[in-house]
């Protein structure tokens, strides 16, 4: 036969469970339950059809090309972002993701915006090239136009005999505002477009 | 010829005076910008700090973030013109930025206070509700246990064998 002491223990345990359930709203306020989700920011680049395809590659002078750049916030709170557009002639001046170092190139165009947690920002980008001069093994891009604003750059590229082209890169760096230090920090993310300018000199 | 020279000298003097008189400071992104742009940046950052405080207090700040983004758009354009050497356009856009975020700090403070008040009320309600619930569970548990114990003892007593004096 079941003893009264055993039933008493069972009854006490059941009561304690019910007490914990009833007290859970107050416990939830007092005891912090940490959210285990990873915090990060996204940076993406979409083609002119708003898909991850059809990115401009063979580009010429006087033409206008378009892409979409976007940022997603999963940092657990609102964030202040900055996206910089930079233009270079190869991999040597690209950001160093392993070292967390942004490109030394000066930004051309930029956006600054605020994104709430779980939300995203996106903008259309148009760009083009002017004053492109071929000079034997070199090709010099004089001006880059981004969203209608013309920037003098004077960037040159050497003929790449392996891939047969003059290659440049237009890339977008993501920076995030550090409230503690009151400055923008490179968020260790960039996306870029490899551009072959060979067509611009009629080759 | 003499008047041309005078004009040139005066022009150079005025130009150098302007470049010296416009204060230049270093911005958070490393660019050297005019005081107007730096002030716009400061206004934007202060407003952002206030919005963050409101958000941490639990307020819905999506409307304020939209206004900050408008300010950010102007400020970014101002930086573009700084790089292009057009300080006049940069200054004008910096002014637009300040206008766009004007009042955001105050609104954020109001939202923060409202959110803090609601949070306090929620906290009070949940603590009070939980305390009352716990008392009800403990008291009713005690009563139930006493009732159960009484019935249990009665049943056990009925099951006890009667002692006879052995006359059979």
Image (cartoon, helix red, strand yellow):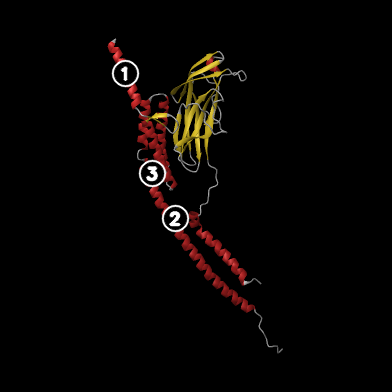
Q: Earlier in the sequence, mark 1 or mark 2?
A: 1
Position of the N terminus of chain B by quadrant: top left
Q: Name the residue under label 1.
A: B11
> Which disc, if any, is residue B108?
3
Image height of B44 relative to A136, above or below: below
Q: Which of marks 2 and 3 is nearer the N terminus?
A: 3
Residue that appears at 50% across and 37% down: A72
Foreground residue among A36 and B9: B9
Chain bearing mark 1: B
Image height of A115 relative to B58, above or below: above
Is there CB contact under 8 Å for labels 1 and 2? no
Q: Name the residue under label 2.
A: B123
Is the same chain shared between marks 2 and 3?
Answer: yes
Chain bearing mark 3: B
Q: Can residue A172 be seen in this view?
A: yes
Is the same chain shared between marks 1 and 2?
Answer: yes
Instruction: Tell me where residue B157 appears, x and y as whole percent.
Output: 62, 78
Residue that appears at 57% across and 64% down: A14
Instruction: Tell me where residue B104 appears, x and y as whole percent.
Output: 37, 40
Tell me the CA gap for discs 1 and 3.
48 Å
* Residue placed furthest toward the bottom: B167
> Helix, strand, or loop for circle 3?
helix
Q: Is residue A48 visible?
A: no
């Amino acid at each position: 036969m079941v003893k009264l002491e055993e039933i008493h223990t069972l009854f006490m345990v059941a009561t304690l469970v019910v007490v914990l359930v009833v007290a859970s709203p107050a416990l939830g306020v007092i005891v912090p339950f940490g959210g285990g989700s990873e915090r990060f920011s996204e940076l993406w680049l979409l083609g002119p059809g708003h898909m991850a395809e059809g990115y401009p590659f063979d580009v010429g002078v006087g033409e206008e090309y378009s892409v979409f750049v976007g940022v997603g916030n999963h940092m657990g709170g609102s964030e202040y972002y900055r996206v910089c557009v930079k233009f270079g002639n190869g991999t040597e001046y690209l950001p160093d993701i392993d070292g967390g170092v942004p490109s030394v190139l000066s930004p051309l165009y930029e956006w600054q915006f605020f994104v709430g947690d779980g939300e995203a920002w996106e903008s259309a980008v148009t760009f083009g090239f002017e004053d492109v001069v071929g000079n034997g093994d070199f090709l010099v891009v004089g001006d880059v136009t981004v969203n209608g604003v013309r920037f003098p750059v004077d960037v040159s590229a050497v003929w790449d005999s392996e891939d047969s082209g003059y290659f440049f890169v237009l890339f977008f760096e993501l920076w995030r505002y550090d409230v503690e230090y009151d400055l923008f920090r490179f968020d260790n993310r960039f996306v870029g477009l490899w551009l072959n300018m060979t067509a611009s000199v009629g080759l | 010829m003499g008047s041309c020279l005078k004009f040139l000298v005066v022009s150079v003097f005025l130009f150098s005076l302007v470049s010296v008189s416009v204060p230049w400071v270093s911005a958070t992104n490393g660019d050297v910008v005019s005081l107007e742009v730096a002030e716009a940046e400061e206004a934007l950052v202060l407003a952002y700090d206030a919005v963050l405080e409101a958000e941490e207090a639990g307020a819905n700040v999506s409307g304020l973030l939209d206004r900050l983004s408008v300010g950010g758009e102007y400020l970014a354009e101002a930086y573009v013109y700084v790089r292009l050497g057009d300080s006049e356009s940069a200054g004008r856009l910096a002014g637009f930025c300040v206008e766009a975020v004007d009042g955001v700090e105050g609104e954020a403070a109001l939202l923060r206070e409202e959110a803090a008040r609601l949070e306090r009320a929620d906290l009070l309600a949940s603590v009070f509700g939980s305390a009352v619930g716990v008392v009800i569970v403990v008291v009713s548990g005690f009563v139930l246990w006493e009732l159960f114990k009484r019935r249990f003892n009665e049943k056990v007593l009925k099951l006890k064998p009667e002692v006879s004096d052995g006359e059979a």
